[in-house]
Image (cartoon, rainbow, N blue to C red):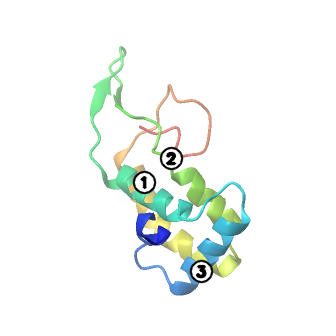
Amino acid sequence: MAISRFLAPPIPRASGSLHAAIRRLEVEDSRLYVGAVNLAWRNWHRQAYGARGRAPYADGYYCCEYCDPMPGRETIELALHRLPRSSARELRRLVAPLDEHFLGRTYPDPHARQGPWWIGRC
């Protein structure tokens, strides 16, 4: 049984050269494993487009049940900084609609811990 059967499907609309660059990065970077970026993509897509419940804080401010995004955006950000420039540009172009959608359906969370832009949203 091939190990590739257990990996997340590839990023939609990504070129073969981007997939190859991601695979090289995953093999070379000890913080990643083979398939980590594809899985991160799936998780971030699910977070950006998935259903979100809202629960009120005591002051009437509404926040989602799961304020911190699923693991994924951090891995994508790491890849954006570690991939060759042309591959990073392509990945950034593909992740931009997810980021925009996430921003459009979330709000700044006044109770969030400090961190990257995707952490302080709910």
Quadrant where the image shows the C terminus: top left
Quadrant where the image shows the N terminus: bottom left
Distance Cα–Cα, label 1 vs label 3: 20 Å
Is tag 2's residue or tag 1's residue first in the polypeptide sequence? 1
Where on the picture, by quarter, is residue 27? bottom right
Task: Mark 2 and mark 1 in contact? Answer it, CB < 8 Å.
Answer: yes
**Which residue matches tag 2?**
71
Q: Position of residue 21 (x, y in %)?
A: 63, 77
> Is residue 56 something that shows in the picture?
yes
* Type of amino acid at the residue the image marks with label 3: Ala
Distance Cα–Cα, label 2 vs label 1: 7 Å
| Mark 1 neighbour class, 10 Å CA radius: few under 14, some 14 to 19, many 20 or more | some
Q: Secondary structure at mark 2?
A: loop
* Type of amino acid at the residue the image marks with label 2: Pro
Q: Position of residue 98 (x, y in %)?
A: 42, 61
Where on the picture, by quarter, is residue 63? top left
Closer to the camera, 52 or 38? 38
Is tag 3's residue or tag 2's residue first in the polypeptide sequence? 3
Q: Residue at x 47, y 79 (%)?
A: 14
Disc marking residue 20:
3
Task: Mark 1 and mark 3 in contact? Answer it, CB < 8 Å.
Answer: no
Q: Secondary structure at mark 3?
A: helix
Q: Residue at x 29, y 32 (%)?
A: 54
Outermost residue toward the top in this view: 58
> Is residue 88 something that shows in the picture?
no
Q: Residue at x 58, y 51 (%)?
A: 74
**Which residue matches tag 1?**
43
Classify 96 as above or below 14.
above
Q: Position of residue 7 (x, y in %)?
A: 45, 65
Q: Nearer the viewer, mark 1 or mark 3?
A: 3
